[in-house]
Amino acid sequence: MASFLINAEVLPAPQTTGGQPLMKVVSERKSSRDFQENQTVTKQDLSNMLWAAWGVTHDGKHTIATAMNRQELVLYVVTPTEVSRYNPEANTLTVVNTGDFRKMAGMQEFAFIAPINIVLAVDTNKQDKPEFQAYTAGAASQNIYLYCAQAGLKTVVRAGFDRDKLPQALKMPANEKILFVQTVGK
Ligand SMILES: Cc1cc2nc3c(=O)[nH]c(=O)nc-3n(C[C@H](O)[C@H](O)[C@H](O)COP(=O)(O)O)c2cc1C
């Protein structure tokens, strides 16, 4: 789609080694809702968490499993100023709409002030089975939780979002479906 080729921002290369020990990070995974206003998440942290969720790792495959390798996950990032779509192969974010759409990305006030809301969506043309779609979004969500736990960031995954308006804000094609939105901040 032509609009995805405009304004692609190359993210910093993800840091794919190091970090805190896995079992410590797993034990510290939790949901937080006490986000502070006017905080930012660095581009490096954003790159790292998107890679943890859906980066390319082996033979063109990803950090998470997908049933029959359908690779149906699609990630959008909602910031206070724009919505972008993640391209894991190029490690880029491409602006698909400008403006503050956080009130559509959540039903709870913390989502309106947090710097990042990651939309976990799927391409239903690639995978039409709801249980497989849910596995994919859930696995990516868990990796975002784990990255946030090890990086000292707060996060919570949510099923609560504006199901009518958020797809419009994302200018989402008809074959894509949003499953969850995950808020990230400090
Ligand atoms: C599928 C799913 C949907 C959720 N939806 C919301 C939500 O809309 N709002 C919210 O505040 N938390 C939501 N949560 C977070 C849960 O409330 C949270 O995971 C649960 O209370 C357990 O807490 P923990 O994550 O800290 O272990 C959701 C979690 C899951 C797995």
Image (cartoon, grey):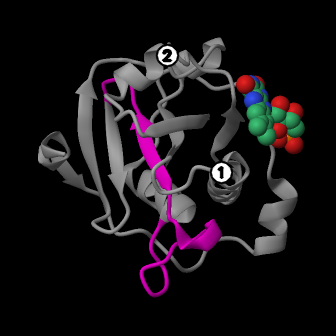
Horizontal and vertical percent for residue 66?
A: 61, 67
Judged left or right of residue 49, residue 137 is right
In the figure, residue 17 lies in which quadrant? Answer: bottom right
Horizontal and vertical percent for residue 124?
A: 50, 47
The residue singled out by tag 2 in the image is 104
Mark 2, other Cα within 10 Å: few <14 / some 14–19 / many ≥20: many
- State whether residue 115 is above or below residue 69: above
Residue visible at 42% across and 80% down in the picture: 60
Mark 1 vs ligand 1: CB below 8 Å: no
Horizontal and vertical percent for residue 133?
A: 63, 50
Name the main secondary structure of what is drawn in magenta: loop
**Callout 2 secondary element:** loop
Mark 1, other Cα within 10 Å: few <14 / some 14–19 / many ≥20: few
- State whether residue 83 is above or below residue 145: above
Residue 129 image label: 1
Query: Is residue 80 part of the magenta span, yes or no?
Result: yes
In this orientation, which residue lies closer to the viewer: 171 or 45? 171
What's the CA distance linking mark 1 and mark 2?
26 Å
Magenta stretch?
55-82
In this orientation, which residue lies closer to the viewer: 175 or 179? 175
Residue visible at 77% across and 63% down in the picture: 25
In this orientation, which residue lies closer to the viewer: 177 or 146? 177
Horizontal and vertical percent for residue 12?
A: 32, 63
Q: The residue under label 1 is which amino acid type?
A: Lys
Whether residue 186 appears in this view of the structure is no
Furthest toward the bottom, the residue is 59
Q: Quadrant of ligand 1?
A: top right
**Callout 1 secondary element:** loop
Please tell me which of labels 1 and 2 falls first in the chain.
2
Mark 1 vs mark 2: in front: 1
